[in-house]
Image (spheres, helix red, strand yellow):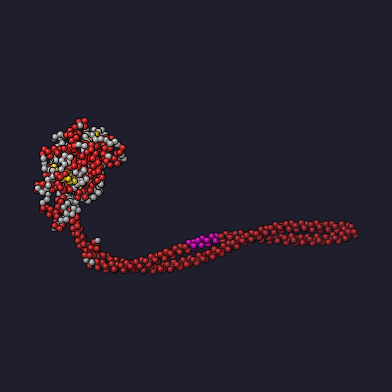
């Protein structure tokens, strides 16, 4: 039979933080390799107990079962029958029969109860006791314990019950007594990952499916088990062997046949079971150990009810076991008599059918793990600064129970000194002292280099002070010059504003004069027009005077013809003639004057038009002047505003210049102080000061 064992626990490297919690809870310490960045597992030395799965708070360790291949087989239509461990009653809210209904819905042909296989197991133990009468029988339902004894305590192999576990009993019963299922694949609904190894060892059992995988599938698919029928198990029902999953369940089942078995039984479970077996062989050989006829042992503290393939870790023990106890009372009531049960058991039991053989795997351990002698142990202790008994802490911080175990692991390359707390404390102390020495030297070097550097910086700092002072003086002078310029701009602004106002007044007056001249020109044109009319009237008057004169002459002629009768008319004619002559003379004079007036008016009108055109040209020039003055005013206003901004910025520049001068002066003072303090720094070498620097 092969000594190698199938992996049943997997390490997720990316999640492992190398905290060594897995090593601390592992009964077989040397199956773990903590020498690297994560803790590896050697499957050939691993028990598959799953303690590390529960202990790992980072989810870096998971169990391996056959759920995926089981699903694939069902999808292919493969013929499968399943057996269900009694621990199922403690999970799934007690709906283990509905779980059987769910499995049938997936394609499982039939489900058998492992509890009846436990009844067969008890009977096999009794027959072995009856025929061979061994001093002690170590129960072997737990595959992790079997692996531990085969690998690490082979001297106890003769004490292991040479009978199959309840699960294998059930498998063999199906093969032997249910020929209809002889060619079916066998699946175990199990609370334990290590069962896979047991099936490999006996060559029976195709799939190991843990409760945890089933529960994960049920939850991820939103399955409600209460909606499935409560299926009765195939095969005969069990009686009190339904207690097998609880600690002491084997002992209580045997008590049905051997009432005083409790006084002859060592009931032990959890981590202590491995400590017990570690010393049992030696104690028996020396006669120091009491000889128990039966060792009822389970690897898990809560028995199979809290196996690594369940979800019961950390739950209330009473609540979990109550479901098992309730089922037990119902099973006992069903049978009522042990005779009826015994008759049923005998129907499914045959001599040599349920025999189990074991393999001494200790050679695998001895091949992989070398036992160092005291010289090597002492050498490793020296390397880890364990120079006296006081340094042997056995603190278990590394995950091992003792410094000697840790030394063995280091010797075999399964761990490293850096994982030893004492080593790290001493190493830190050594590095601290070395650091202090290096720090003192570094401080001296730093002090010397800093003094040299700062000394070189004195000249630039002095230059900075000089430049800062000159810059301040220059900025003061510039500030005064710009202030004067701004004041001149302000005066120009005022003059330009006054000029614009005067120009505006002149523009308004020019517009009024231009309008008046235009009006005079119009009036002169009207007078000229009227003068023409008067001239026309004067011509008419002159013509009338001529006609009157002519009439007077005619009248005089007529009067002369009349003689004395015409004397009076002659006088009148003479006067009219004089009047006509006088009127003609005046008309001629008026006409001459009117012509002269008209000439003057025409000349005035022409001059007025020239004056009007000149005023238009002057008005246009005044308008251009006003526009230019407005542009000048806008530019002067911008200069005025810019001058204000320049003054504001000058104030800031003055402030910055003063600040630079102050800082430069302060830097000069600090540099002098810093040089002095650095000169004093190497003198500060007391332990307290160096410790503070280190912190």
18 lies left or right of 483: left
Q: Looking at the picture, tell me which residue is in the foreground, 370 or 222.
A: 222
Image location (x, y in percent) of residue 152: 14, 45
Image location (x, y in percent) of residue 627: 54, 60
Q: Quadrant of the N terminus?
A: top left
Which quadrant of the figure has residue 436? Answer: bottom left
Q: Residue furthest right?
A: 564
381 lies left or right of 520: left
Q: Residue furthest left?
A: 286
What secondary structure is the stretch in magenta mostly built from? helix
Q: Which residues are magenta?
A: 624-638
- Name above or below for residue 173 compared with residue 246: above
Q: Is residue 631 magenta?
A: yes
Q: How many marks?
A: 0
Q: Looking at the picture, tell me which residue is in the foreground, 33 or 223.
A: 223
Q: Quadrant of the C terminus?
A: bottom left
Q: Residue furthest top?
A: 180
229 lies left or right of 138: right
Residue 164: in sight, yes or no?
A: no
- Name above or below for residue 258 compared with residue 483: above
Seen at 17% across and 51% down, the residue is: 400
Image location (x, y in percent) of residue 622: 56, 61
Which quadrant of the figure has residue 221? Answer: top left
Which quadrant of the figure has residue 539? Answer: bottom right
- Name above or below for residue 358 compared with residue 522: above
Q: Is residue 341 magenta?
A: no
Image location (x, y in percent) of residue 5: 17, 41
Q: Looking at the picture, tell me which residue is in the foreground, 639 or 158.
A: 158
Seen at 46% across and 66% down, the residue is: 486
Residue 552: in sight, yes or no?
A: yes
């Amino acid at each position: 039979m092969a000594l190698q064992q199938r992996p049943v626990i997997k390490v997720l490297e990316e999640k492992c933080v190398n905290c060594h919690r897995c090593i601390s809870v592992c009964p077989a310490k040397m199956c773990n390799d903590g020498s690297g960045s994560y803790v590896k597992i050697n499957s050939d030395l691993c028990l598959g107990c799953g303690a590390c799965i529960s202990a790992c708070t980072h989810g870096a360790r998971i169990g391996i079962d056959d759920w995926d291949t089981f699903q694939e087989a069902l999808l292919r239509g493969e013929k499968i029958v399943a057996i269900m461990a009694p621990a199922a009653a403690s999970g799934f809210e007690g709906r283990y029969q509905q779980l059987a209904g769910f499995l049938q819905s997936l394609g499982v042909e039939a489900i058998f109860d492992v509890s009846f296989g436990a009844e067969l197991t008890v009977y096999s133990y009794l027959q072995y006791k009856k025929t061979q009468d061994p001093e002690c029988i170590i129960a072997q339902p737990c595959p992790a314990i079997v692996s531990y004894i085969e690998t690490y305590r082979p001297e106890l192999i003769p004490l292991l019950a040479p009978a199959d576990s309840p699960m294998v009993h059930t498998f063999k019963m199906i093969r032997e007594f249910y020929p209809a299922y002889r060619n079916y694949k066998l699946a175990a609904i199990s609370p334990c990952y290590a069962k896979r190894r047991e099936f490999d060892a006996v060559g029976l059992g195709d799939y190991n499916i843990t409760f945890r995988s089933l529960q994960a599938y049920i939850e991820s698919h939103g399955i409600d088990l209460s909606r499935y029928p409560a299926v009765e198990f195939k095969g005969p029902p069990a009686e009190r062997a339904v207690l097998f999953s609880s600690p002491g369940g084997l002992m209580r089942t045997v008590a049905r046949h051997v009432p005083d078995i409790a006084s002859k039984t060592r009931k032990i479970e959890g981590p202590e079971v491995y400590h017990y077996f570690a010393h049992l062989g030696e104690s028996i050989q020396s006669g120091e150990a009491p000889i128990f006829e039966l060792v009822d042992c389970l690897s898990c503290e809560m028995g199979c009810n809290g196996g690594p393939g369940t979800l019961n870790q950390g739950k209330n023990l009473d609540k979990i076991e109550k479901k098992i106890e309730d089922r037990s009372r119902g099973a006992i009531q069903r049978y009522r008599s042990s005779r009826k049960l015994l008759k049923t058991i005998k129907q499914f039991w045959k001599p040599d059918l349920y025999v189990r053989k074991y393999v001494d795997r200790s050679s695998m351990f001895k091949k992989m793990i070398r036992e160092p002698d005291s010289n090597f142990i002492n050498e490793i202790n020296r390397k880890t600064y364990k120079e006296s008994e006081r340094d042997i802490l056995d603190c278990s911080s590394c995950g091992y129970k003792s410094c000697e175990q840790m030394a063995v692991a280091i010797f075999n390359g399964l761990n490293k000194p850096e994982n030893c707390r004492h080593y790290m404390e001493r190493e830190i102390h050594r590095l601290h002292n070395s650091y202090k020495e290096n720090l003192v030297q570094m401080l001296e070097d730093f002090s010397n280099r800093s003094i040299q550097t700062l000394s070189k910086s004195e000249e630039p700092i002095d230059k900075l002070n000089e430049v800062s002072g000159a810059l301040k003086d220059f900025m003061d002078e510039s500030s005064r010059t710009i202030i004067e310029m701004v004041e001149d701009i302000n005066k120009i602004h005022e003059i330009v504003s006054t000029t614009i106002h005067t120009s505006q007044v002149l523009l308004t007056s020019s517009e009024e004069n231009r309008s008046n001249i235009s009006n005079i020109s119009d009036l002169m044109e009207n007078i000229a027009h009227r003068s023409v009319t008067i001239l026309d009237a004067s011509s008419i008057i002159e013509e009338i005077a001529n006609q009157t004169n002519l009439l007077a002459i005619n009248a005089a002629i007529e009067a002369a013809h009349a003689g004395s009768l015409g004397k009076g008319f002659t006088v009148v004619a003479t006067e009219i003639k004089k009047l006509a002559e006088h009127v003609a003379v005046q008309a001629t004079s008026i006409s001459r004057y009117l012509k002269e007036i008209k000439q003057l008016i025409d000349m005035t009108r022409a001059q007025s038009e020239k004056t009007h055109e000149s005023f238009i040209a002057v008005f246009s020039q005044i308008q251009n002047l006003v526009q230019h003055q407005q542009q000048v005013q806008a530019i002067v206003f911008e200069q005025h505003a810019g001058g204000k901004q320049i003054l504001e910025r000058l104030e800031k520049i003055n402030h910055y210049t003063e600040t630079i001068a102050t800082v430069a002066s302060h830097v000069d003072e600090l540099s002098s102080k810093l040089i002095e303090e650095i000169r004093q720094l190497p003198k500060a070498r007391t332990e307290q000061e160096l410790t503070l620097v280190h912190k």
